[in-house]
Amino acid sequence: MTRFAWGAASDTGRVRQANEDSYLVVDGLFAVADGMGGHQAGEVASRLALETLHAEFTAAGTDVLVRAVENANDALVSRSTADPELAGMGTTLVAMALVDASGRDAIGVVNVGDSRLYLLSDGELAQITEDHSLVATMERQGRLTAAEAAVHPQRNILTRALGIDGTVLVDSWEILPIIGDRYLICSDGLFNEVDENRISATLRRLADPNEACRELIRLANEGGGRDNITCVVVDVIDDSGRDPNADPANRVRSSHTGGDLTVTDVPTTEPKPPKAPGAIRRSFTWRVGAFIAAFVFVILVGLAFIWWTGTKTWYVGVDGDNVAIFNGKPGGVLWIQPSLAEDSDLLLANVPAAALIDLENGVQQPSLKSARSYIDKLIEQNAKTATTTSTVTSSTTSSSTTTTIAQ
Ligand code: MN
């Protein structure tokens, strides 16, 4: 028989007037609900959800746990429809329970909303549940990093909650109970104020589950206490009811209503909702794929453009004492430096003064051919200037004037 030791604590925090979180700890069933709605409606929602869960749950299996959550949703919807004061109330719900899995003990986990269940195993903390929030969706789509999501102003917007709609999608998992494993169920008032490294360190340091809960709440208040904070810590102290042949390395299983189990590893666990399986996952994969393809395309076009301007362009410039044609852009493009394409016989000394500055900066040309004809023109000009200066003794200025007239 699998046995647990547990502790729990809840606190209003330092900003809110009321505590709308609720928790449930009875032997074999542990849950946290974070209610929302004006005029204490959130308090009603979270309490009603856990009362219904408690009343409907039997340890017969994870599917019973899922149905109990669906019934809690029904209870909330009828209550808020009946009472205008409670219209619009809703709640998150995350629960773990000892359930029967083909005659053996397992821990069934269900989740709707952005409260979380973590598993601390061999000193490693892993988030088992997946948040149903706007920022978590954006993070999965690659539109936000984990760090951005943690401080996003809209991180309290949920994509799923109980009491909002007649039907609700419930994520579920089945986990192999192993002695020494420690579970943490908490509301967002904890992990929004305390980073996971600190949560993990506290869970490792304090053996007593009640003490661990109190310390986590103290840390959350120290971090700001901007929301209600609730923690339930559950330790597995006996696992003799579990299947001795089960592989502890693949202990987290997402459960199907049909009974077939898909095995996944702890860090990469994916929920398999019993209804409309994988709808959100699929669009997530598709969008990320499209995003990566577009991103790679833009990068390739950019690189091609840089390569083209860096190598497939020409300019006339200076190489030592000579005028020369270069491949590339004057000064280079990023890491692509211009290279000498061909030297000409034209000496700098024979270049008209007006063109010298241009050459120092590099005179860009659309093709190698036009670069050559630019040099030919300079040679031609030089030849004419040489003729004029041999007959008329004058300054450089007047010689170029003569050249202009001669043209
Ligand atoms: Mn909250």
Image: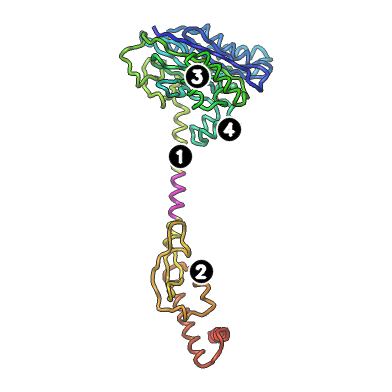
Return the x and y of residue 169 as percentages of the image width and height: 50, 20
Where does label 4 land, which residue? 152
Cβ–Cβ below 8 Å for labels 2 and 3? no
Cβ–Cβ below 8 Å for labels 1 and 2? no
3 or 1: tag closer to the N-terminus: 3
Return the x and y of residue 247 as percentages of the image width and height: 33, 18
Provide the secondary structure element on which disc 1 rests. helix
266 over 138 or under it: above or below: above
How did the renderer colour the structure? rainbow
Q: CA distance from mark 1 to mark 2?
A: 44 Å
Q: In terms of secondary structure, what is the magenta stretch mainly?
A: helix
The amino acid type, in three-letter code, at marker 4 is His
Provide the secondary structure element on which disc 4 rests. loop
Q: CA distance from mark 2 to mark 3?
A: 67 Å
Q: CA distance from mark 4 to mark 1?
A: 25 Å
The amino acid type, in three-letter code, at marker 3 is Asn
Q: Nearer the viewer, mark 2 or mark 3?
A: 2
Where does label 1 land, which residue? 290
Where does label 3 land, which residue? 111
Using the rendered image of the protein, determine whether residue 339 is visible from the camera's viewpoint. yes
- 107 inside magenta stretch: no
Where does label 2 land, which residue? 361
Q: Nearer the viewer, mark 4 or mark 3?
A: 4
Provide the secondary structure element on which disc 3 rests. strand
Quick one: label 3, few (<14), some, or many (20+) residues within 10 Å? many
4 or 3: tag closer to the N-terminus: 3
Q: Nearer the viewer, mark 4 or mark 1?
A: 4
